[in-house]
Image: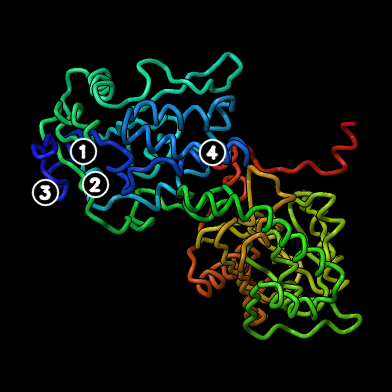
């Protein structure tokens, strides 16, 4: 066999490589799995639609048979065409930046990563479209350059579904791409996992083969950059089987979500807790929340970390009573059907402070100072405005478990967030009420608003086992959507009209 001339990657030394160059294949080499189908499906779904994803899934028998018996190039070309034809390149780029990294990061090969990260110059050579691989490879693997299949783009800025010559980078095409990119520089080490990699591997001074030996993936916190932010609706890596189950479940899941939402809407919160259990929703409540405020007394400010748009409602259910909430963005429809009073913040400091004070005079209030959700075990920066307005503060730690769909989005339809959460077969919400902040830890006790906000952030992170970050809402939206995350206020909209 031709592969016998290459040593296994386990035998490659990572010592003294800081001045050397490595060229590595991606799927099956830097990643454990050689099957790139899940990533094409994610592009088809997140940059396209459910129908496009279903069409891609239907092509699986043809693609797999073609790959095994006829042509790797034709199989990859089919995946590329179905998943990208007619899509705006900008949409593909954003999916590659906000959705794919999380799934790539969960599948990094430990031996390949050990070798790859030890080199001073790192090149990724892949048959996958460069546009899909590049954001992850550069940000999380430290690749200096990604050489991959290039999508053909029409004058309208949309992908045609075809590739720029020489087409899919496999075999001789991959070898020629390395020669064009590196010129007279010969890579010190080449890594691949299949016969179509052997041509470019043979150019390198040393070449190593990634064998089918089973390994656990590299922990995400051991990559060059921690994975804190990501988007997309799917929780599990969409292999053909997972994708099939997910697509078949969607109509039933949506019907179930409608029942879970609208049956509970008119019911008092103290009854909703029990209805949740009957409908397969697990709400875990810990701690001792304060009693309702007495008539004429101001309410308590429940300060929560933010996991989904449902956080304030679940706090109300956990308390068994009505509360109000403030939010940075809420649609008119969501505001209309919300079982609790929801007031949108304007981002005008004085106006927002006035609204929060008024709501606290009316009763208990829930606020999420992060201003946006975070799915991973991290807390974003807490805005300090709330700390200036009351000393009656109760930190609330919130965590969720979703096994099929994420109940939050940046680029998708936010209106659908609660429905996607309740489309999970067995969603879990865990609410932990901590002790009310003592007077000496509030602004009334001499602390600054920033000190109070940072203390609560640290307290919640310790309770949840999360890590604190200084990432803001604006930075999150810039990373995942290329916007500042601002939602135009109703007043401004009226003025424009």
Mark 3 burial class by Cα count in 10 Å: few <14, some 14-19, many 20+: few
Residue 233 placement (x, y as % from top left): 59, 50
Residue 191, label in figure: 1
Determine the CA span between mark 3 and mark 4: 36 Å
Residue 33 placement (x, y as % from top left): 33, 47
Q: Earlier in the sequence, mark 2 or mark 3?
A: 3
Which of these two is toward me, 252 or 468?
252
Task: Tell me whether circle 1 and circle 2 mark residues in contact (CB < 8 Å).
Answer: yes
Q: Earlier in the sequence, mark 3 or mark 4?
A: 3
Q: Which residue is denoted by mark 3 in the rendering? A: 11
Q: Give me the residue at 27% from left, 25% from top.
A: 174
Q: Is residue 468 above or below residue 289?
A: above
Determine the CA span between mark 2 and mark 4: 25 Å
Which of these two is toward me, 127 or 357?
127
Q: Quadrant of residue 481?
A: top right
Residue 95, label in figure: 4
Q: Which residue is denoted by mark 2 in the rendering? A: 112
Residue 343 placement (x, y as % from top left): 82, 58
Determine the CA span between mark 1 and mark 3: 12 Å
Q: Give the position of the N terminus as an image quadrant.
A: top left
Secondary structure of the residue carrying numbered label 2: helix
Q: Give me the residue at 24% from left, 21% from top.
A: 172
Q: Is residue 361 left or right of residue 372?
A: right
Secondary structure of the residue carrying numbered label 3: helix
Q: Is residue 345 left or right of residue 440?
A: right
Residue 213, label in figure: none
Task: Tell me whether circle 3 and circle 4 mark residues in contact (CB < 8 Å).
Answer: no
Q: Give the position of the C terminus as an image quadrant.
A: top right
Q: Is residue 434 above or below residue 117?
A: below
Residue 227 makes an appearance in the image: yes
Which of these two is toward me, 383 or 132?
132
Secondary structure of the residue carrying numbered label 4: helix
């Amino acid at each position: 066999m031709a592969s016998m001339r290459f040593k296994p990657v386990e035998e490659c030394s990572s010592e003294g490589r800081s001045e050397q160059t490595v060229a590595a294949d991606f799927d099956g080499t830097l990643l454990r799995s050689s099957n790139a189908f899940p990533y094409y499906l994610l592009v088809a779904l997140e940059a396209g639609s459910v129908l496009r994803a279903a069409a891609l899934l239907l092509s699986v028998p043809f693609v797999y048979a073609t790959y095994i018996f006829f042509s790797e190039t034709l199989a990859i070309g089919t995946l590329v065409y179905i998943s990208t034809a007619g899509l705006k390149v900008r949409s593909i780029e954003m999916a590659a930046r906000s959705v794919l990294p999380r799934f790539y990061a969960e599948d990094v090969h430990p031996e390949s990563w050990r070798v790859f990260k030890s080199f001073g110059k790192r090149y990724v050579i892949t048959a996958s479209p460069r546009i899909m691989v590049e954001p992850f490879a550069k940000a999380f693997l430290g690749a200096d350059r990604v050489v991959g299949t290039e999508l053909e783009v029409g004058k309208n800025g949309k992908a045609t579904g075809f590739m720029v010559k020489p087409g899919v980078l496999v075999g001789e095409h991959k070898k020629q791409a390395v020669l064009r990119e590196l010129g007279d520089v010969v890579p010190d080490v080449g890594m691949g996992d299949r016969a179509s990699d052997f041509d470019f591997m043979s150019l390198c001074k040393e070449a190593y083969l990634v064998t089918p030996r089973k390994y656990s993936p590299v922990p995400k916190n051991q990559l060059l950059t921690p994975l804190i932010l990501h988007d997309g609706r799917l929780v599990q890596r969409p292999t053909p089987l997972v994708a099939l189950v997910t697509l078949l479940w969607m109509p039933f899941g949506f019907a179930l979500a409608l029942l879970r939402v609208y049956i509970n809407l008119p019911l008092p919160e103290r009854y909703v807790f029990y209805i949740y259990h009957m409908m397969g929703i697990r709400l875990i409540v810990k701690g001792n929340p304060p009693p309702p405020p007495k008539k004429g007394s101001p309410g308590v400010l429940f300060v929560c970390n933010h996991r989904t748009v449902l956080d304030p409602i679940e706090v109300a259910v956990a308390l068994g009573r009505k509360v109000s909430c403030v939010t940075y963005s809420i649609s008119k429809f969501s505001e209309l059907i919300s079982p609790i009073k929801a007031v949108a913040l304007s981002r005008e400091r004085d106006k927002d402070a006035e609204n929060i004070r008024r709501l606290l005079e009316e009763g208990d209030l829930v606020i999420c100072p992060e201003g946006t959700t975070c799915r991973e075990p991290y807390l974003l920066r807490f805005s300090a405005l709330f700390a200036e307005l009351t000393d009656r503060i109760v930190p609330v730690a919130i965590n969720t478990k979703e096994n099929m769909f994420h109940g939050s989005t940046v680029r998708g339809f936010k209106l659908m967030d609660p429905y996607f959460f309740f489309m999970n077969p067995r969603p879990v919400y865990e609410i932990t009420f901590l002790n009310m902040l003592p007077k000496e830890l509030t602004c009334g006790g001499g602390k600054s608003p920033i000190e109070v906000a940072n203390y609560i952030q640290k307290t919640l992170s310790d309770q949840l086992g999360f890590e604190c970050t200084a990432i803001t809402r604006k930075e999150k939206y810039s990373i995942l959507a290329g916007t500042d995350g601002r939602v135009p206020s109703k007043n401004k909209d009226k003025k424009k009209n």
